[in-house]
Image: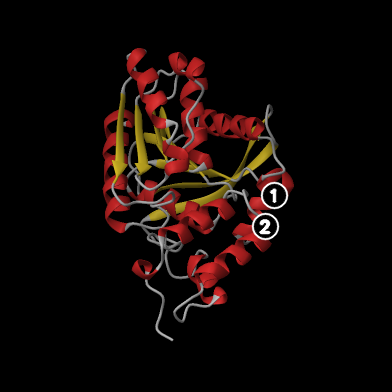
Amino acid sequence: MHPIKKEDIRQEVFDLYDDYAHNRIDRRSFVQRLSTYAIGGLTVPALMSFLMPDYATTAQVKPEDGRVKTTYIHYDSPKGGGSIKALLAWPEGLKKKTGGVVVVHENRGLNPYIEDVARRVALAGFVALAPDALTPLGGYPGNDDAGRDLQAKRDKNEMLEDFIAAADYLKTQPNCNGKVGVVGFCFGGWIANMMAVRMPGLSAAVPFYGTQPAADDVPKIKAPLLLHYGALDTRVNEGWPAYEATLKNNHKKYTAYIYPNANHGFHNNTTPRYDKDAADLAWQRTIDFFKKHLL
């Protein structure tokens, strides 16, 4: 059988995977509904394999890349989960202090994709800190299905406290110049929005396809925002018009991009929802934004 290509897959399959990835349907229902699209030589196992993340071959900045230094640390989150494990990454040979960036994972813990993103941030010249909000439950368990199940057991507002504490910790690092921003994906996009609400000293926030804060919270935002959305991500995008109107009404600094024909998760290069053109452009815009506000 020929390898499955992204263009062979109907949008409904990606929407179905989005429902599964966000715990709106369980695995059994996902497999049952997926069978509807197992036609023309496509089998359910083949579709499942195609949709699941590939961490083995997709790292853009490999863990052993000598241009980046990394170490695992623990920091204290007294209002959240206590002692939280995180990956700390910074450029090799850093000569002067630089900006800090908290990298916030999706709804499945600190998986290899998010660790890779942290290394990309470091390669771009920043100190990156990627916490694992699953630490109180034993940490990322090694696969995303189990990670989603674990994360669903934690309170999202307690996890928000973990990432706020991460920003405070990052500010104190000897390589950090005291300016800290955040980039987050999916659940992490909501965290990035809420860190902007909760932290008046935050220097920049970049939510990727993140759920929006309540209208009453928008006046509290001080940090400039760079927001990325995929045009096909109707679930998250339905909250954007009201959010934008409130940002405008409160004279907040923001720039938003909606990427044509891009799905939720388009930046995640480990799954077929990845859109290279949109991801590359959004990432370059993100790094330029951080260089403007954190250096």
Q: CA distance from mark 2 to mark 1?
A: 6 Å
Instruction: Give the tally of numbered discs.
Output: 2
**Residue picked out by circle 1:** 150
Q: Amino acid at mark 2?
A: Ala
Q: Which residue is mark 2?
A: 146
- For mark 1, give the secondary structure: helix
- Point out the residue furthest to the bottom here: 1
Residue 141: image x %, image y %? 67, 58
Q: Is residue 203 visible?
A: no
Q: Residues within 10 Å of mark 2 (few under 14, many from 20)?
A: few
Residue 245 is at least partly visible in this image: yes
The secondary element bearing badge 2 is classed as helix
Rendering quarter of residue 80: top right
Quadrant for the C terminus in the image: top left
Q: Which mark is residue 37?
A: none
Query: At x 52% / y 46%, what residue is drawn?
Result: 105
Please, which colouring scheme is shown? secondary structure
Note whether 180 is above or below 8 in the view shown.
above
Residue 15 percent coordinates (x, y)? 48, 54
Residue at the image position 33 percent from the left and 57 percent from the top: 275
Q: Quick check: 195 left or right of 227? A: right
Find residue 156 and report its horizontal and vertical position in percent.
63, 35
Other residues around mark 1 within 10 Å, as few (<14) / some (14–19) / many (≥20): many
Which sits in the foreground, 133 or 187? Answer: 187
Residue pictured at 44% horizontal, 48% vertical: 118
Q: Residue at (26%, 38%) from the top-left corner?
A: 288
Q: Is residue 124 left or right of residue 106?
A: left
Most foreground residue, 93 or 223: 223
In percent of width and height, residue 143 lies at 62, 61
Q: Nearer the viewer, residue 13 or 167?
A: 13
Type of amino acid at the residue the image marks with label 1 = Leu
Whether the residues at callouts 2 and 1 have beta carbons within 8 Å, the answer is yes
